[in-house]
Image (spheres, rainbow, N blue to C red):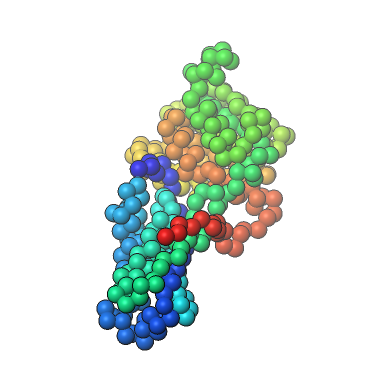
Amino acid sequence: MKDVSDKISTQRVAEAKATLRLSPSTVFKIKNLTVPKGNVLEVARVAAIQAAKNTHQIIPFCHPIPVDFVSVEYDIDEDCVCVRTKVKAIYKTGVEMEALTSASVAVLTIYDMVKMFDELAEIEGITLLSKSGGKSDFYKKNKCANLKACVIVLSDSLSQLSENERLTEDKSGKAIVEHLLSIGFANENINLHIIPDDESELTAIILKASDQNASDLIVTTGGTGVSPQDKTFECLQSLIEKPLPGVVEAIRTYGQERNPLAMLSRQAAGTRGKSLIVSLPGSTSGVKDAMIAAFPHVLHSLEMLQGKKHVSEKPKRSTTSAANK
């Protein structure tokens, strides 16, 4: 069973189709409610809904998903019944298996109710029509290829080491860089700085990155606590022109679900000019949690800074994969 505990929940939607070929006389019986076992379509509808909600009990590696919605629709021709199902859930993983299982059980139920008098009944195919809601639906990797990032690690202890020792001992900065690479940033477009907890030095690097080098993204790690030397929050507040409180809320909520101490982190996020600035905690685990919570979705703000409009609706990923009888 795949570990999805580090994923964020988004609305997941999947649609599937299954087709059952029948004798015309059987279709006539279904339409006219003369099948001995009862109302075929309504029984199949209930079975399909139950199947969607219990898919994890049928398919071994499926997660138990809190299904929010299941619809079952029929297209009836003279010699077949086509079942279309749609499943929705707000969760960490997709619902395509729920939609496929739902459609499968619907046609199996119909098959069971007519098999006594229709030897020609045959399940032709089970197809996933579309799915949406995953990370790639909100931001594509190729959009990051040309973005410039400045990563700033604030640590008095690391800054006292030699350059080679800094790069070896640094964990939080590496975690940020690795995540940026994983979502499509090019290594040559990421600059890493390791500096002491010094407000003036941090200010100078951010002003240069934003105002002179036109960095698209500036990420800091460290200096977000409540100790006397932690001044990152105050520094960024003075530099940020348009705060993004929702980014901070998302990071803190995700982190606090995993570590209650995340409530003590004083973070800031916002824009300066056309640069996006996000501060992260100093711990490696805190950085990893924050990157998962905010990226790549937060990068949509860069498109807004360039004057692009919001997409009116989430895109759907279509698929032609099918499982035949």
**Hey, which quadrant is residue 263 in on the image?**
top left
Where's residue 15, x and y in %? Answer: 47, 63
User: Would you say residue 50 is visible in this rendering?
Assistant: yes
Residue under the point 55% across and 49% down: 136
Number of numbered discs on residues:
0
Q: Is 275 or 93 nearer to us in this picture?
A: 93
Where's residue 307, x and y in %? Answer: 69, 54
Residue under the point 43% across and 45% down: 7
**Hey, which quadrant is residue 260 in on the image?**
top left
Q: Is residue 36 above or below residue 321?
A: below
Where's residue 264, x and y in %? Answer: 39, 38
Q: Is residue 240 above or below residue 105?
A: above
The quarter of the image holding the C terminus is bottom left
The quarter of the image holding the N terminus is top left
**Hey, which quadrant is residue 42 in on the image?**
bottom left
**What residue occupies the far right of the structure in this picture?**
212
User: Would you say residue 49 is visible in this rendering?
Assistant: no
**What residue occupies the far left of the structure in this picture?**
37
Q: Is residue 35 above or below residue 311?
A: below
Where's residue 10, x and y in %? Answer: 45, 54
**What residue occupies the far top of the structure in this picture?**
162
- Is residue 113 rendered to the left or right of residue 315? left
Residue under the point 64% across and 34% down: 186
Q: Is 76 or 70 nearer to us in this picture?
A: 76
- Is residue 124 rendered to the left or right of residue 256? right
Residue under the point 33% across and 57% down: 55
Q: Is 92 or 97 nearer to us in this picture?
A: 97
